[in-house]
Image: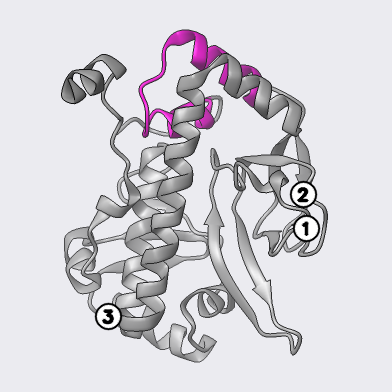
Amino acid sequence: MRRFDPSENLLVRKMEAFVRLPEEDKAALDRVWRGNRQSVSAQCDIVQEGDPPRWMRVIAKGWACRYKMLVDGRRQITGFFLPGDMCDLNIFLLPRMDYSIRALEPVQYIALSPFECEKLMAAHPLVLRAWWRETLANAAIQREWTVNLGQRSALERLAHLLCELHIRLKVIGMVSDDVFDFPITQLELADTLGLTAVHVSRTLKELRTRNLIRLRGHRLCIADFHELCRIAMFDANYLHLEPERSIPELQADCA
């Protein structure tokens, strides 16, 4: 796995985890990546529930989360957006946002209008195919998170989330020697895993005691990834991070 290059187009790298793209498609995505960026400070909302969804956003730098807030102030985090991720391809088809997106650290993102998205997809059908595959993979992640909340223990939930983030970051080259940035607080982990912050603290301590992870500041080291996977019963197949075969190969299978 290549090391992280800050100048690299992570949108291209992420899309090529789903579909092998020709140079002209990469060039189109490169124009998107090098477009105007907007910045949001840590712990500020990028978009709020109830807003009209005018843009499709691509995270260029930093981490963000999708969340729902109950009227009594309780929060459930339902997803993490990493560099190269799209904040829901077809969200602008809906009249109102039914969730909010918040920056977990300083975030830069690229905003594409519906017209820009449709123009890009019409001109580059393999880009559209890659985006649809990412959409389906995101739905699979949501199903796995439902299993996490409903069936796994606290230790299994946390281990599973760490395995997932490790794989997703490794795909875009943001893991070095099993170490990666981890700008998630214990309270945010609690709101993700359906636990209390105290329970998360105890669970992190157990993973440390077993020498499975090391966490210093906002840097996480996975010391024993295979054992972490075993504890979590983690199977990365639901992430669907294998480039699709070429269209001629797919057509041959259908012949």
* Mark 2 burial class by Cα count in 10 Å: few <14, some 14-19, many 20+: many
Q: Residue at x 70, y 82 (%)?
A: 70
Q: Earlier in the sequence, mark 1 or mark 2?
A: 2
Look at mark 3 in the image and give the residue it sits on: 209
Amino acid beneath label 3: Thr
Tag 1–tag 2 contact (CB < 8 Å):
yes
Look at mark 2 in the image and give the residue it sits on: 53
**Farthest residue in the front direction?**
255
Q: Nearer the viewer, mark 2 or mark 3?
A: 2
Tag 2–tag 3 contact (CB < 8 Å):
no
Amino acid beneath label 2: Pro
Q: What kind of element bears circle 2?
A: loop
Look at mark 1 in the image and give the residue it sits on: 96
Q: Magenta region: which residues?
A: 8-33
Q: Is residue 116 left or right of residue 155?
A: right
Image coordinates for residue 243, horizontal then vertical, percent: 30, 30
**Residue 225 in sight:** yes
Q: What kind of element bears circle 3?
A: helix
Image coordinates for residue 192, horizontal then vertical, percent: 51, 74
C-alpha distance separating marks 1 and 2: 6 Å
Q: What kind of element bears circle 1?
A: loop
For this rendering, which residue is in front, 126 or 183? 126
